């Protein structure tokens, strides 16, 4: 058995990944895969709460697998798999449902937000944290690298592990979230959290002209080119921090001294994003030419993950008296 810590994370196949997903989650995935026994999942059962069209779901799932490989996840180091290839996740989520109360799930931020916006909530969306707890706990996960918005979900997984252990005896490890504080929330074009659901993203693998057009849409205040500007409240500058590695200090001085227009700032940002994204995009195009290979990687990852999940469920079923 490896002595490395176990890591698991996932992303829902609900749209093109954006630079918020990259800096909040995917970049860490790649950096952490050497030092951990890593599992990277495509959360398609979670995605079904949002995408209810078969061909579209299949297409988004294959594309997210290509994205994972393009950013540098390596099937020789990490288990890369589809959530739906491991039915034990949903089986364990059911068991967690039976020890969880409605008021507890009603305290989840995601549920409260949906309610505040008067959205109709599916039972799947309501139970979302229990399926996510199952995803994490079934592999005896130690660390879960995610963006800030997922912190509460990892706490739900910890609470659920504790509750199960209290009722049925020591079974699950308590996982820790791993959040990069300096990029905890990447702002979108409108200044809210960048999110596929808010239509305010810069897709990670966008083409040059799309990147330029999107940068021009970033919302700013109305200061004229020669007015001093506050970098700490500007949405363009927040993105410079991720991309302007060699000229950040210079841009900051020009902001404070009123020596840059927002238009020029956006142009510099677009140039830097394009410089950063070009090699990733080239790699993605090469991977996308061989979908059969990508599917084979998912199938192999699914088998490895499943073996672990089945072994854990044997223990769970014995503890709960479902098997005897
Ligand atoms: P979205 O909100 O765009 O649908 P997901 O919920 O699929 O994104 O998130 C996938 C991963 O990316 C999660 O770990 C999440 O915390 C992270 N993430 C998403 N948006 C951001 C953001 N704007 N800043 C930092 N991390 C983010
Ligand atoms: N809820 C996560 C998101 O929206 C996706 C996810 C599902 C996940 N299961 C997980 C993340 C397990 C980490 C661990 O981004």
Image (cartoon, helix red, strand yellow):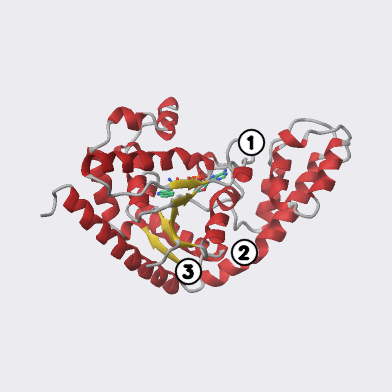
Mark sitting earlier along the chain (2/3):
3
Q: CA distance from mark 2 to mark 3?
A: 19 Å
Residue, disc 3: 77
Task: Say left or right for 169 vs 283.
Answer: left
The quarter of the displayed image where residue 94 is located: top left
Task: Say left or right for 165 vs 50.
Answer: left
For mark 2, give the secondary structure. helix
Mark sitting earlier along the chain (1/2):
1
**Rendered image: mark on residue 280:** 2
Mark sitting earlier along the chain (3/1):
3
Q: Position of residue 187 (x, y in %)?
A: 62, 40
Nearer the observer, 18 or 110 = 110
Q: Is residue 312 visible?
A: yes
Q: Is residue 52 visible?
A: no
Q: Is residue 129 above or below residue 246?
A: above
Nearer the observer, 2 or 282 = 2
> Crowding at label 2, few (<14), some or many (≥20) Cα neighbours within 10 Å?
some
For mark 3, give the secondary structure. loop
Q: Position of residue 216 (x, y in %)?
A: 72, 44
Residue, disc 1: 191
Cβ atoms under marks 2 and 3 closer than 8 Å = no
Residue at 27% across, 47% down: 170
């Amino acid at each position: 058995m490896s002595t490395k810590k176990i890591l698991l994370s996932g992303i829902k196949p609900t749209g093109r990944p954006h630079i918020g997903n990259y800096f909040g989650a995917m970049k860490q995935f790649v950096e952490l895969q050497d030092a951990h026994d890593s599992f990277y999942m495509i959360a398609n059962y979670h995605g079904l709460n949002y995408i209810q069209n078969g061909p579209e779901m299949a297409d988004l799932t294959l594309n997210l697998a290509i994205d994972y490989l393009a950013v540098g996840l390596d099937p020789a180091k990490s288990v890369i798999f589809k959530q739906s290839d491991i039915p034990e996740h949903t089986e364990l989520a059911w068991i967690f449902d039976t020890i969880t109360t409605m008021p507890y799930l009603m305290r989840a931020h995601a549920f409260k937000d949906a309610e505040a916006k008067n959205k109709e909530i599916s039972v799947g969306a309501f139970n979302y944290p229990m399926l996510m707890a199952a995803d994490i706990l079934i592999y005896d996960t130690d660390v879960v690298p995610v963006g800030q918005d997922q912190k509460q979900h990892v706490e739900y997984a910890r609470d659920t592990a504790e509750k199960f252990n209290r009722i049925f005896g020591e079974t699950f490890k308590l996982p820790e979230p791993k959040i990069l504080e300096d990029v905890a929330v990447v702002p979108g074009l409108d200044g809210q959290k960048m999110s596929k659901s808010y239509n305010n993203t810069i897709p990670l693998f966008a083409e040059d002209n799309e990147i330029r057009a999107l940068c021009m849409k970033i919302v700013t205040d109305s200061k004229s080119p020669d007015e001093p500007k506050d970098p700490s409240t500007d949405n363009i500058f927040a993105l410079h921090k991720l991309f302007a590695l060699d000229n950040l200090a210079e841009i900051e001085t020009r902001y404070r001294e009123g020596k840059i227009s927002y238009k020029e700032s956006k142009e510099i940002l677009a140039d830097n994003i394009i410089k950063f994204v070009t090699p990733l995009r080239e790699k993605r195009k090469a991977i996308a030419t061989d979908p059969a290979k990508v599917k084979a990687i998912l199938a192999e990852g699914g088998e490895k993950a499943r073996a672990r999940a089945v072994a854990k469920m044997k223990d769970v079923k014995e503890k709960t008296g479902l098997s005897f």
